[in-house]
């Protein structure tokens, strides 16, 4: 059995938020990219939980080859992290991230999966922390003609059957599907594990397999982005605070209720 996990390199969302709150998040002259070079880049958190989901299947006794794939300019660092966690294969698809949209990412990853012998299970994070779109897993499932199960907080494997617990607004939902399938993992899975010091040292010697779009023999339509960024901007956020007056807690409560009713909130 073969399990493939798709990972993406993103800007540290906590650092981005801190820059934004401090008013220091700046867009370059092209109007599309951030100018801050001090913001660290790391593996998308949901994707790291997708690796954790695969490792839990291995802990439960499942026997499979675990491959981790990433498309970007230089994803070697996060792929070595994946190797330290327990990935058997790590693959870097070398491509300019500025030229990527979700259709092209899905085309590249799907072609790589097919070129490497296919997959019984493809695990992805539910979305990326930079654009929050969550479209790529569905496009991969469509291209590879696989079932798609989203927002999974637990995945079990018995033979060629997946039993998945999904998170929904109405509560947890239990579903089954036959392999091959694409499953997206949500943060309710729990915290991912840390690699051991020995595994991190060993992973330093790992050299990811590098492929290019030309190696994957995609046609011109597949390599043409369908969506392009025309402008990115930091919105101006303004907050207004009104202080209520009252001689007692009860009077303050009455004033608050009157205000909420006047604003049609209650």
Image (cartoon, grey):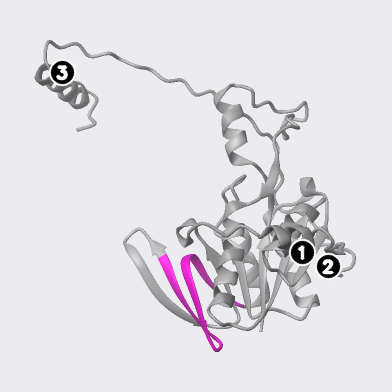
* Residue at left offset 77%, top offset 64%: 108
Q: Is residue 38 above or below residue 239?
A: below
In this rendering, the count of numbered labels is 3
Say whether residue 90 is left or right of residue 152.
right
Q: Nearer the viewer, mark 2 or mark 3?
A: 3
State which mark lies toward you, 1 or 3. Answer: 3
Earlier residue among tags 2 and 3: 2
- Residue located beneath label 3 in the image: 252
- Predominant secondary structure, magenta span: strand
Question: Measuring 19% from the left and 11% from the top, which residue is drawn there?
Answer: 245
- Image spot of residue 65 (x, y percent): 70, 78
Marks 1 and 2, how far apart at CA: 8 Å
Residue 92 appears anywhere in the view: yes
Q: Position of residue 152 (x, y in %)?
A: 48, 66
In the displayed structure, would residue 132 be above or below residue 142? above
Q: Which residue is mark 2?
A: 218
Residue shown at the point (15%, 12%) measured from the top left: 246
Residue 90, which numbered label? none
Look at 55% across and 89% down and name the residue there: 159
CB atoms of marks 1 and 2 within 8 Å: yes
Expressed as whole percent of the image width and height from the top left, the position of residue 186 reads 50, 59
Please report the bounds of the magenta region as a residue range.
Answer: 146-166
Query: Which element is circle 3 on?
Result: helix
Q: Is residue 239 magenta?
A: no
Q: Which element type, helix, strand or loop, lies under badge 2?
A: loop
Rate crowding at label 1 as few (under 14), some (14 to 19) or many (20 or more) other CA atoms within 10 Å: many
Q: Which residue is labeled 1 in the image?
A: 108
Viewer-side residue, 13 vs 143: 13
């Amino acid at each position: 059995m073969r399990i493939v996990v798709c990972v993406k390199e993103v800007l540290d969302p906590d650092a981005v938020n801190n820059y934004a709150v401090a008013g220091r998040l700046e867009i370059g002259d092209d109007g599309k990219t951030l100018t801050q070079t001090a913001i660290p880049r790391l593996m998308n958190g949901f994707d790291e939980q997708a690796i954790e989901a695969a490792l839990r299947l291995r802990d439960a006794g499942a026997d499979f080859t675990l491959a981790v794939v990433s498309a970007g300019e230089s994803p070697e660092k996060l792929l070595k992290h994946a190797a330290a966690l327990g990935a058997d294969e790590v693959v870097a698809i070398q491509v300019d991230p500025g030229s990527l949209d979700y259709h092209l990412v899905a085309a590249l990853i799907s072609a790589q999966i097919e070129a490497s012998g296919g997959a019984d299970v493809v695990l992805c994070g539910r979305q990326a922390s930079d654009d929050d779109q969550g479209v790529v897993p569905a496009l991969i499932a469509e291209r590879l003609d696989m079932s798609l199960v989203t927002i999974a907080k637990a995945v079990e494997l018995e033979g060629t059957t997946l039993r998945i617990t999904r998170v929904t607004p109405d509560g947890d939902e239990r579903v089954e599907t036959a392999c091959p399938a694409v499953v997206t993992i949500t943060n309710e899975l729990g915290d991912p594990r840390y690699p051991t010091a020995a595994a991190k040292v060993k992973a330093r010697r790992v050299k990811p397999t590098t492929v290019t779009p030309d190696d994957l023999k995609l046609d011109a339509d597949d390599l043409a982005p369908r969506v392009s960024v025309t402008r990115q901007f930091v919105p101006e956020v303004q907050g207004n605070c009104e202080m209520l007056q009252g001689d007692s807690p009860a009077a303050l409560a009455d004033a608050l209720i009157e205000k909420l009713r006047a604003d049609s909130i209650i």
